[in-house]
Image (cartoon, rainbow, N blue to C red):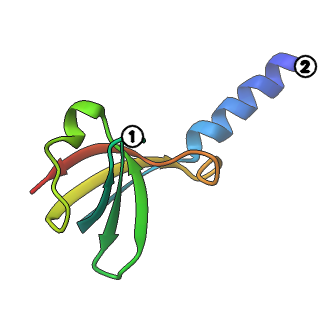
Amino acid sequence: MVIIVIIISGFIYLNGQSTTSAVAFVVDINDSDSTIIVENLDKERTTVRVPRSTIKLIETDSEYFVVYKYNKWTNWITTPKLSSIEP
C-alpha cells in the first residue's frame, strides 16, 4: 500500500513540472542568492535561479530569450531554475 502511494505521489510531482520561455529583460541580479529577476513583455516579473558560472555573464537592462523550469506543485516554495538564456 505504501509503495502505491509513493508511486502515485511521484507521478503527480513529475506531472507538475513545466518549462516556460519568454523574451524578457533582466531587471535585477542577486549574486549572493544566484538569482535574477526577469520581466517579460507583459511586465510580469519572475525570480529565476541561475548557475553561479552563468550569472557573471548576464547584464541588467538587457533583453534575453530565457527558458526556465518550475514545478507548479512547489512553485510557492522553490524558485524556477534557468535552463537556457540567449541574448
Horizontal side, residue 1 vs residue 35: left or right: right
Q: Is residue 53 above or below residue 63?
A: above
The type of residue carrying mark 1 is: Ser
Question: Which residue position holds label 1?
Answer: 32
Report the front residue among 19 and 27.
27
Percent position of residue 85, x then y: 19, 49
Dot 2: within a 10 Å radius of its alpha carbon, few (fewer than 14), some, or many (20 or more) residues?
Answer: few
Q: Is residue 66 above or below residue 74?
A: below
Horizontal side, residue 73 vs residue 79: left or right: right
Percent position of residue 26, x then y: 25, 63
Of marks 1 and 2, the one in the foreground: 1
**Which residue occupies 32% across, 71% down?**
39
Report the front residue among 69 and 49.
49
Mark 1 and mark 2: span between their CA atoms?
Answer: 44 Å
Report the front residue among 13 and 1.
13
The type of residue carrying mark 2 is: Met
Nearer-N-terminus badge (1/2) = 2
Residues under numbered marks 1 and 2 in contact, where contact means CB atoms less than 8 Å apart? no
**Which residue occupies 23% across, 45% down?**
84
Mark identifier at residue 1: 2
Q: Is residue 38 above or below residue 52?
A: below
Percent position of residue 9, x then y: 73, 33
